């Protein structure tokens, strides 16, 4: 079973040299900490920055320099600021190679729900709908089951959707799964100590298992 | 050079009345027009329709207008930082239209480009698409559905820039640029408050974000608090 850092570490292996990457709030933000040396990536923050650096040292926080999660950050050599319309322009035009975001539910055909729980939580979609509608490669970082033990990898999402047929890969505390173009969660890797049977029991949507499924190497 | 300078914020807001639609720049509390918001609270204008990415926090930014119940309708993409907002929304006192962030900013931009509408894929297949016209386009070899979204028609745009000159040319600082430029060009009457107001010729024309033609009134703001919403740091060494 992976913890949050474990999920982030596994996703970091999907990040390729030369990628421009947009990281969502939560586990996706942690991915930045695990990008291997020698892999050069540029992080896009949709409030208007390419080349997001680490948090500032104490005492050097700057109210004019934040990321999309409203956290104080820094720039790096080669960073660039731009306005929000251009920021979503480069997202729509598919200049950003990889989008990593969290989800409350994902369906076997790649639908994602992550912005609203009717009657309970209405915070808004922020930039998530724009990102999932346009991104070429979307990886979702999420928990496999909810607090009640119910699967969040479903045949069909029950919550209001953020986007349809867009998620390509899901990494959870239990497994790495690809969403096939024709539908279905194809099991790629198991988390350390997790059996295929446990993953089957935690997945409501169609689970496709072909041959021996390797345990992931972190 | 045409002089866009007004004496102070009160003169800038002289014709701001109840029931108008306004764009308010900023992302979270970053780059918000602090002086204009404070003056709107003071003036007590009501029934405002506010187009802004966020709704401030309970005691700062647009949260100050919400507390005084001056906002009738909020058009935003993310409103999660404000308890009073949530209360007014759930009780039905406040009308809320949640719009995807890229759609929100592009509807501001379109107004400044003189285009009445745009097509965007954001929200296709979701409740955002309900009641909207859609159309399929093949673009770069990919056939996709797009939603028709209309440019905003805002009576005023309230923006904050770092430096400006009396001709209305604006330069923003770092990520405080965010929505400010698209709103500055998208408003029917654009009012800019700046940290530093200079004479024409003092700003390098190569590095101006918003040309003064879009800006109607400009003044130097005072007492910037520039509150930080999420103070995140790392340890030295």
Image: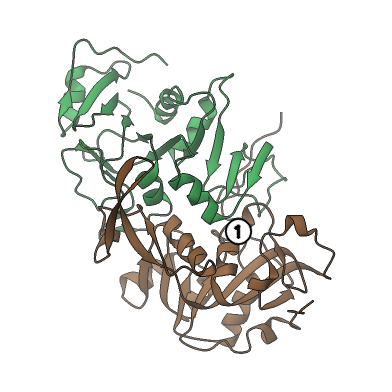
* Left or right of B176, for residue A111: left
Q: In which chain is the residue bearing label 1?
A: B
Using the rendered image of the protein, determine whether residue B61 is visible from the camera's viewpoint: no
Residue A195 can be seen in this image: yes
Q: Is residue B56 left or right of residue A173?
A: right
Q: Which residue is mark 1?
A: B30
Rendering coords of residue B89 (x, y %): 35, 71
Residue A212 location, x and y as percent? 22, 10
Give the x, y percent position of residue A87.
53, 50
* Location of the C terminus of chain A (image quadrant): top left
Of residue B11 and residue A164, the one placed in the foreground of this image is A164
Q: Which chain is brown?
A: B
Specify the quadrant of the image occupied by residue A139: top left
Q: Between residues A94 and B180, which one lies in front from this camera angle?
A: A94
In this rendering, position of residue A85 left or right of residue B75: right
Going by the image, does A185 lie left or right of A138? left
The residue furthest top is A212
Instruction: Please identify which colour was used for chain A in the image.
Output: green
x and y, in percent, of residue A185 in the image: 22, 28
| Depth check, front residue: B123 or A173 | B123
Q: Residue at x 35, y 15 (%)?
A: A216
Q: Residue at x 51, y 30 (%)?
A: A19
B19 to B89, vertically: above or below: below
- Residue drawn at 31 percent across, 32 percent down: A168
Q: Is residue A33 above or below residue B135?
A: above
Determine the secondary structure under disc 1. Answer: loop
């Amino acid at each position: 079973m992976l913890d949050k850092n474990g999920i982030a570490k596994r996703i970091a292996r999907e990040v390729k040299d030369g990628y421009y990457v947009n990281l969502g709030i939560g586990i996706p933000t942690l991915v930045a900490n695990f990008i291997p040396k020698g892999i050069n990536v540029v992080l896009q923050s949709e409030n208007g920055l390419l080349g997001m650096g680490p948090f500032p040292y104490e005492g050097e926080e700057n109210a004019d320099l934040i990321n999309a999660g409203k956290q104080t950050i820094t720039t790096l050599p080669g960073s660039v600021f731009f306005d929000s319309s251009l920021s979503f322009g480069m997202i729509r035009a598919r200049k950003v190679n990889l989008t990593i975001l969290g989800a409350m539910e994902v369906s076997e055909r790649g639908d994602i729900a992550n912005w609203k729980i009717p009657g309970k939580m209405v915070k808004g979609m922020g930039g998530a709908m724009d990102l999932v509608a346009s991104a070429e490669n979307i990886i979702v970082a999420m928990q496999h089951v909810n607090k009640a033990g119910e699967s969040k990898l479903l045949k069909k999402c029950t919550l209001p959707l953020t986007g349809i047929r867009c998620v390509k890969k899901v990494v959870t505390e239990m497994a790495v799964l690809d969403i096939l173009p024709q539908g279905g969660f194809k099991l790629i890797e198991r988390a350390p100590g997790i059996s295929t049977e446990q993953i089957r029991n935690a997945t409501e949507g169609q689970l496709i298992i072909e041959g021996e499924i390797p345990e992931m190497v972190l | 050079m045409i002089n866009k300078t007004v004496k102070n914020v009160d003169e800038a807001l002289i014709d701001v009345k109840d029931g108008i639609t306004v764009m308010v720049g900023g992302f979270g509390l970053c780059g918000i027009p602090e002086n204009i918001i404070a003056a709107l609270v003071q003036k007590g204008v009501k029934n405002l329709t506010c187009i802004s990415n966020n709704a401030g926090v309970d005691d700062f930014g647009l949260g100050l207008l919400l507390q005084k119940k001056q906002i009738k309708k909020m058009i935003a993409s993310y409103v999660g930082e404000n308890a009073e907002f949530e209360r007014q929304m759930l009780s039905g006192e406040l009308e809320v239209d949640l719009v995807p962030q890229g759609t929100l900013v592009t509807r501001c931009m379109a107004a400044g480009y003189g285009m009445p509408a745009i097509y965007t894929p954001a929200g296709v297949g979701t409740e955002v698409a309900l009641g909207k016209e859609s159309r399929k386009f093949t673009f770069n070899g990919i056939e996709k559905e797009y939603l028709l979204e209309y440019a905003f028609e805002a009576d005023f745009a309230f923006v904050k820039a770092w430096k400006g000159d009396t001709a209305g040319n604006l330069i923003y600082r770092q990520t405080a640029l965010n929505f400010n430029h698209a709103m500055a060009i998208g408003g029917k009457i654009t009012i800019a408050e700046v940290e530093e107001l200079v004479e024409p010729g003092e700003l390098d024309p190569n590095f101006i974000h918003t040309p003064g033609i879009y800006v109607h009134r400009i003044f130097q703001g005072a007492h910037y608090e520039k509150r930080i919403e999420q103070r995140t740091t790392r340890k030295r060494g």
